[in-house]
Image (tube, helix red, strand yellow):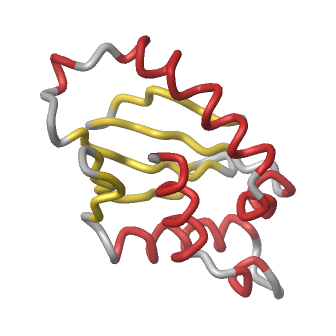
Amino acid sequence: MIVAAIAFVVCFFAPQWLFKGSESFDKTLVTTANEISKNCPLMVDEGTRLDSAEAMEKNTLQNKYTLVWMSKKEIDIEAMRAYMEPILVSNYKTNPEMTLFSKNNTKLTYAYEGQEWYSCF
């Protein structure tokens, strides 16, 4: 469910025309992050809120989330990583909507309250 929501958010707010033309891909990531963040906070499922997105150095797009039904100290980051990693990697590799990121070797990171808990490539 969260993977579908992530794909929806990225694809809805980052139309393919952003990835074409003379603008560098770094600038495209900034534009994409700004468009996503403009529409935040956004509930992506019943327990997960997307708070913002940020274009980072080295071709990285970071998505920042809050799990609204848990406090930070209640979250087992390693258990979350073990559960989400195969789902996110599969989505990155197989979802046609992620092709532009994978073709540009963009690293996607997912963070909770500033703590990075998973990176895709």
Q: Give coordinates of residue 107: x percent, y percent.
A: 67, 43
Is 80 on the left or on the right of 19, as rendered? left
* Rendered view: 20 above or below 69: below
Q: Give coordinates of residue 41: x percent, y percent.
A: 25, 64
In which quarter of the view is residue 71 placed?
Answer: top left
Q: Which residue is nearer to you in this view: 95 or 98?
A: 95
* Rendered view: 21 above or below 100: below
Q: Farthest right residue? A: 103
* Rendered view: 30 above or below 91: below
Q: Give coordinates of residue 1: x percent, y percent.
A: 46, 47
Which residue sits at x=33%, y=46%?
65
Q: Quadrant of the C terminus?
A: top right
Which residue sits at x=74%, y=54%?
95
- Number of numbered callouts drawn: 0
Q: Give coordinates of residue 13: x percent, y percent.
A: 52, 76
Is 103 on the left or on the right of 27, as rendered? right
Which residue sits at x=58%, y=59%?
7
In which quarter of the view is residue 92 placed?
Answer: top right
Which residue sits at x=45%, y=50%?
63
